[in-house]
Image: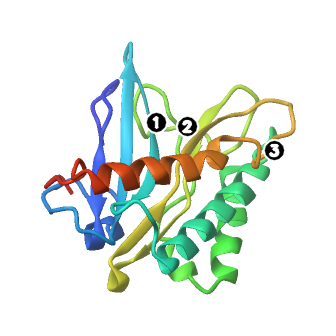
Amino acid sequence: SSVAGEAEEELASGGHAAIPHYFHNDAELVAGSALLIDAGAAWERYAADITRVLPVSGRFTPRQREVYELVLRAQAAAIAAVRPGSSFAKVDAAARKVISDAGLGAHFIHATCHHVGLDVHDPGPSGIEAGMTFTVEPGIYLESEGLGVRIEDIVLVTDLTIDPDADHRDRWPEVAAWLAERYAEGAIIASIC
């Protein structure tokens, strides 16, 4: 846990990404593995975080893509359950149903949501009201496959209907192409994860 107003970072690849909140960041990036980035930011004592998973080589393997897309579908279902009057339990159940229906429920080992604010994992009520901000972050952790996938975004609760498909995810081909170029240039060689 961070000190109030400070952000935390997690960089983990391969088997380390299968350990939620792995903070040692001491392994070499290996071609063919996926890199989990849980990036935190702080501003004027307020803190928050998001998580992304990127393929080290610029392209997901078929299995990595399958798990990534499953987590993405779980997140979309969870975000669709966010509305005033709902609860963290209902949002969590929506994400968990998608992952459990795919046979991987035992590998989703943390809560789907946490509040953000003075701490990255701020305490708060489990009921959802307009004006709240919190994360929606389903994840699947497959230690035997050396794979962890978590997608975390921050939502602001309003009285408006949320369209989970109207967001940044259509930019993935651009990000993948950029990563593949950097990898080919030798720019992505590091010992940070």
Q: Give the image quarter of residue 45.
A: top left
Query: Element type at marker 1?
Result: loop
Q: Are marks 1 and 2 in contact (CB under 8 Å)?
A: yes
Quadrant showing the C terminus:
bottom left
Q: CA distance from mark 1 to mark 2?
A: 6 Å
Type of amino acid under label 1: Asp
How packed mark 1 is, by other alpha carbons closer than 10 Å (few <14, some 14-19, many 20 or more), is some
Residue at the farthest top position: 44
Q: Is residue 138 above or below residue 103?
A: above
| Residue 124: numbered disc | 2
User: What residue appears at the point 42 percent right and 57 percent down from the top-left corner?
Assistant: 54
Identify the residue shown where x is 64% and y is 70%.
Answer: 96
Q: CA distance from mark 3 to mark 2?
A: 25 Å
What residue lies at 37% left-to-right and 51% top-to-bottom?
A: 181
Q: Nearer the viewer, residue 100 or 187?
A: 187
Residue occupied by mark 1? 122
